[in-house]
Image: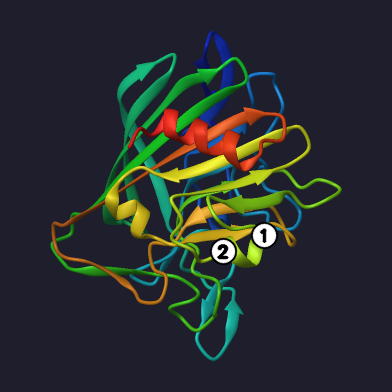
Amino acid sequence: MNPALVLCCAGRPVAHYTTRPALAGDHSPRPHLHPVTTLAGVRVTELMPQDHPHHLGVGVAVPDVAGRNFWGGRTFVRDRGPTPLDNHGVQRHDGFTLRAPDGFVERLSWTAGDRVLLREHRTVATAVLSESAWALDFTFSLTEVSGQALSIGSPATNGRPGAAYGGFFWRAPKEAAPPAVFGADADGEAAVHGSRAGWVALAGEGWTLVFAGATEETRRDPWFVRAAEYPGVGSCLAHDRRLPVAAGATVVRRVVTVVADGRLGRAEAAALVHKAVPA
């Protein structure tokens, strides 16, 4: 495993990025950010937790790309349920085109055996918002390169209602009590999960994460939100139907996450989102 790249914001280290994790194949090895911290040093990510060992901090994870698992763990199979399959892909780090203290631009290949299904262009950057908050700007572009159309699915499109995860994903730390969940006009996990809200927030013990879609396409994706079972937020590339990717086509998504010290209220969260992603 290569040494992690350290990202800084306001002169402080706030994230470590691992490009080539030494993981078994059933984890669907992929570059990821962990640990990520607030400006005061509170950790807000989890790596390989006991409840879901294939959760790897912050990154892009998709459980079904043309039948290949880039999420890790078991694959949900219609009429069979979660099933261990030898179908795990690897997101291979191909190099950086830019590296700076506050961000990077990376090239990746999504591989299944010796076949490349997708090429990814990933941009990650930090920005200070206040003395107690910063933003992680995460953009990924997935391009079909084999010349054959494919599609992206999720457990939901394969028969498991409410489990449309796949895309950007942030695993937060599990604490004694679940984090509070709220959006711009909703409260609670049940109300926010599956919504197409402009932003959603998790507020834990001494920290708040506010996730905002930063492009029109990203804002059309519903949010995947968990709090009671485990704390995590992600986007849903394939919510109620598979996402087709034509030969040579590109899918682009951008999520900006506010990372704040303290437990923010709705008005404070909204103000920071507006600063991080101006309308």
Mark 2 falls on what kind of element?
Answer: loop
Vertical side of 168 occupied by 238: above or below: below
Mark 1 or mark 2, earlier in chain? 1
- The residue pinned by badge 2 equals 193
Q: What's the image's color scheme? A: rainbow
Q: Is residue 116 left or right of residue 170?
A: left
- Extreme bottom residue here? 79
Q: Residue at x 58, y 31 (%)?
A: 259
Vertical side of 169 occupied by 117: above or below: below
Q: Residue at x 64, y 46 (%)?
A: 202
- Amino acid at circle 1: Gly
- The residue pinned by badge 1 equals 188
Which of the pair 230/59 is nearer the observer? 230
Q: Is residue 108 left or right of residue 260?
A: left
The image position of residue 29, as x and y in percent, is 50, 48
Vertical side of 241 occupied by 7: above or below: above
Which of the pair 141/68 is nearer the observer? 141
The quadrant in which the C terminus is found is top left
The image position of residue 70, as x and y in percent, is 45, 58
Which of the pair 129/186 is nearer the observer? 186
Q: How many marks?
A: 2
Crowd class of label 1 (few under 14; some 14 to 19; many from 20; radius 10 Å):
some
- Amino acid at circle 2: His
**Disc ID at residue 134:** none
Q: Quadrant of residue 221?
A: bottom left
The image position of residue 130, as x and y in percent, is 55, 18
- Extreme top residue here? 11
Crowd class of label 2 (few under 14; some 14 to 19; many from 20; radius 10 Å):
many
